[in-house]
Amino acid sequence: MSDPSPMEIALSEAREAASRGEVPVGALVLAPDGSELARAGNAVEAAHDASGHAELIAMRAAAARLGSSRLTGCTLVATLEPCAMCAGACSHFRIARLIFGAYDPKGGAVQHGAALFRQPGCLHRPMVIGGVREQESAALLRDFFAVRRGSPAAPG
C-alpha cells in the first residue's frame, strides 16, 4: 500500500478536528523536497482562539521546525480555501504553493471575497491550485454543519 497523499493527510486532520467538535478543516505543510514539516486540524474551540485555524497552526509549526519565519519553497495543503487571515499568513510566511480542496464562496479569500493574492499590495503570491478532492472536502463541511443544525446530512 502506498503512502497517503498530502490531501489525504489534510482530510484526515479535518476528520479528527470534526471528532473534537471543531469545524473540519485540516492542513499540511510540505518542505521543498516534499517531506512533511507539520500538520494540523482546526483548534479554535479547544484553544479558545479565533486564530486557531489549521493552516495557521501548521505554518507556525513548520516555521518553528525550520527555525525560520519564512517557508520559502514550501507547499501548504488545506482542505478549504483559506480565509483572509490564512491567505495573509501564506503571503507573510512566503508559501510557494497553496493547494486546497473545497472552494469557500462565503469566507474564502483566495478565489473569492478579497482575492488577496490578486491585490496590488500583496507582498507575495503563491502558486494556487484549488479544487483538489473538492467533493470530499466539501462533504465533510456540509455533513458537519448539517449535524450541528440538527438536519440530516446531505448525501455525499
Image (tube, helix red, strand yellow):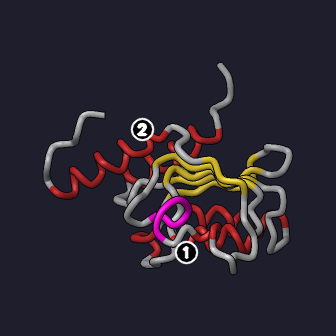
Mark 2: amino acid = Gln
Marks 1 & 2, CB-CB < 8 Å contact: no
The residue located at (27%, 55%) in the rendering is 145
Q: Is residue 116 above or below residue 81?
A: below
Crowding at label 1, few (<14), some or many (≥20) Cα neighbours within 10 Å? Answer: some
Q: Main secondary structure of the magenta part?
A: loop
Foreground pick, 140 / 115: 115
Residue 4 placement, left or right of 135: right
Foreground pick, 99 / 145: 99
Q: Secondary structure at mark 2?
A: helix
The image position of residue 108, as x and y in percent, is: 47, 63
- Which mark is first along the chain, 2 or 1? 1
Which quadrant: the C terminus? top left
Magenta segment includes 14 = no
Foreground pick, 70 / 41: 70
**Magenta stretch?**
108-113
Q: Which residue is mark 2?
A: 135
Q: Which residue is mark 1?
A: 85
Residue 71 placement, left or right of 109: right
Crowding at label 2, few (<14), some or many (≥20) Cα neighbours within 10 Å? Answer: few
Foreground pick, 111 / 20: 111
The image position of residue 153, as x and y in percent, is: 21, 42
Mark 1: amino acid = Met
Magenta segment includes 110 = yes
The image position of residue 41, as x and y in percent, is: 51, 57
Question: Label 1 to label 2, Cα distance in Å?
Answer: 24 Å
The image position of residue 79, as x and y in percent, is: 51, 50
